[in-house]
Image (cartoon, coloured by chain):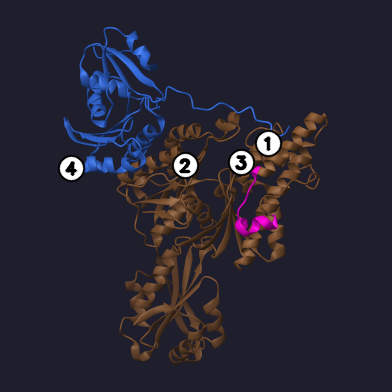
Chain colours: A blue, B brown
Amino acid sequence: MLLSIDTSHGTSAAVFADECLSFVAIDDLFTHAESIGLAIEQALQQADVSVEQLTAVAVGRGPAPYTGLRVGMAAATSLSKARSLPLYGVITLDAIANSISDKDLLVVTDAKRKELFAATYKAGNRLLGPMLITAEELTNYPGFELIQQPCNAKLIGQYVKKALQLGVDLSDLSALYLRSPDVTPSPGKKVSG
Amino acid sequence: MDLRILSQSDLSAIMQIETALFGSEAWSEETMSSELITPHSYYIGVFDPSLVGYAGLRLAPADFAADVLTIGVAASKQGKGIGRRLMDALLLHAKRQGAEQVFLEVKESNASAISLYKSLGFEQIDLRKRYYQPSGENAVVMKLVIQQPIVLGIESSCDETGVGIVRGNRLLANALHSSMTEHAKYGGVVPEVAARAHLEALSPTLGQALLDAGIKIEQVDAIAVANGPGLAGALMVGIGAAKGLAVATNKPIYAVNHLVGHIGADVLEKGSVELPTIALLVSGGHTSLLLVRDLLDDVVLLGETIDDAAGEAFDKVARLLGLPYPGGPQIDKQAATGDPKAIKFPRGLMLPKDLAEHKYNFSFSGLKTAVARYVEKAELEGTEISKADVAASFREAVIDVLLTKAIWACEEYKIPRLLLGGGVVANARLRDEAQRRCDAAGIELRIPRFSLCTDNGAMIAALGAQLVMAGRKPSGLGFGAESTLSVTTIQTP
């Protein structure tokens, strides 16, 4: 019984047995902290699964704008640790590509500041990325079908089911920001003269 | 029948029952009178409509214990459940005040009382021969064990990832990870850097806390988390983690105020926090002066900084002097050999014209600018400055304003008690000067140990435990981060 969590876009949680048993999504992009507990709780309730029945947890680790992403990752980390469950980290672009097709894909999500998070896929395998590109750079990948859609917990869960069968390593649990913290040391300013 | 706390005005009614019941073994009126006002004592009575029964308890907070000192029900009113009602009220009070064990003595011949105590969970632990005088009767010593709630608290409002665990008012663990060194190259806390560090530190800090406390997560009775005030992105990591834990363990969650947590930390030192108190919280993010009459219901913000926090001023002045971050310890080191009176730096919001509106507010921006001007002027003129004198004079200006206003508050509100909290309390000069001025003004000064003064998870757990012990309803799962949360919102519903 797998619980999947994603806050790379909105806030969502899903429960999987062999199939997806429940999927709860709260699409608001500014209420991750408010929504995360409710989303997980409702996903468990709708699936009629108790938290004790879970056997694994999966979480989207971006790339995504930071503040919301961390909420889902923090919840998945503490929940899996508290229940001593394995936690799988998923690159959200991989989960999106997996949900589309095995064709050649350029998967992008909104990175804010007129940039995009992107990765290319061939026959289900990631070729390039994840990386940051501008809208103008979208034309640099001819032959790849452009897929622009957000990720969610259902896509994460579906991907994990398949990836585990294929033996994909999902042990990296670091958040993918693809940008340095937005700061430069101040040189200090004069106050006199 | 009403039950209420007894006061001196009830003394004669108490003594009537006391002497009728206990005869030559009765307490004297003087003893009873002083018992009523002894610190940590709790005397209650049942009225129908006049006093028909009374009982008294004394807490020993440092031992997490309480003693039932007396209980008496008028002979004509016995057998009506009044004794049980009094005992229930005493035990509820003991539980809420953090007692882990309650002791009492009872005459061996008093079978009905012994049976009542046994039904409440007391067990005999000793028999004292000829304890009661002059009758020479034996005393049965009994003990009740109270299971206090285990609460895990998460703190992530700034640059410290804290996970603390308490049982009632007892500290079990206080694990901490600081991202301070990562902020050093920026000269101050960078919110995004802090938030990233929280996520990375979360799992190891949680693991460390459980290890230190020697408990399993299933043993935790409630989760507490600071949901403000603080850096929104940083707070959200702690909130996400806390909600994950609450769902994982099916345990209630309490969203608590970070600043009130600083005050609550003192219960972990002495088993209780003496109230009312004035509290001065000084850190890199806050400079707040509070009037605390009740930790859970009555915290008033008297004043706060209108620009920089005191700790921020230390960091900024350290940079002006070419000293590394964090500035507090650096300024302290320099100031050790400096003259605090060498340079007359301004005292913010201390002029008579400021006091009408800003009696208890602080401002350190002007002070920082004054130091900058002083340093730049020396540079322009090509003269050497004494870093030691600048540091000492600056530090003195900050401390002077902080303590002057804190002591004004103690005097205005007639509260001879001052509690310090926040990271700036690490400053030895602040502590020494606070002690000197409090001694001179007859004010009791409380400073928790440093690990409970800086941001930490234990203080959040302690405040959460206070809420649990008081029987407060948990927060819903839908609360968010409140970066400017008012100190009057002690718990977010």
The CA distance from mark 4 to mark 3 is 51 Å
Q: Amino acid at mark 2?
A: Ser
Q: Can you give x and y, in whole percent of width and height, for residue A1 in the image?
A: 22, 34
Residue corresponding to mark 1 = B318
Q: Amino acid at mark 3?
A: Glu
Tell us which disc is closer to us: 4 or 1: 1
Q: Within 10 Å of the Cα at label 4, are there few (<14), some (14-19), or many (20+) other Cα atoms?
A: few
Q: Which mark is residue B341?
A: none
Tell me the SS state at disc 1: helix
Under circle 3, the secondary element is helix
Distance CA(mark 4)–CA(mark 1): 58 Å
> What label sits on residue B312 in the rendered view?
3
Residue beneath disc 2:
B156
Question: According to the image, label 4 marks what residue?
Answer: A48
Say above or below: A127 vs B106.
Answer: above
- Return the disc, 3 or 2, that comes first in the chain's sequence: 2
Tell me residue A133's x, y (percent).
39, 16
- Contact between marks 4 and 3 (CB within 8 A): the answer is no
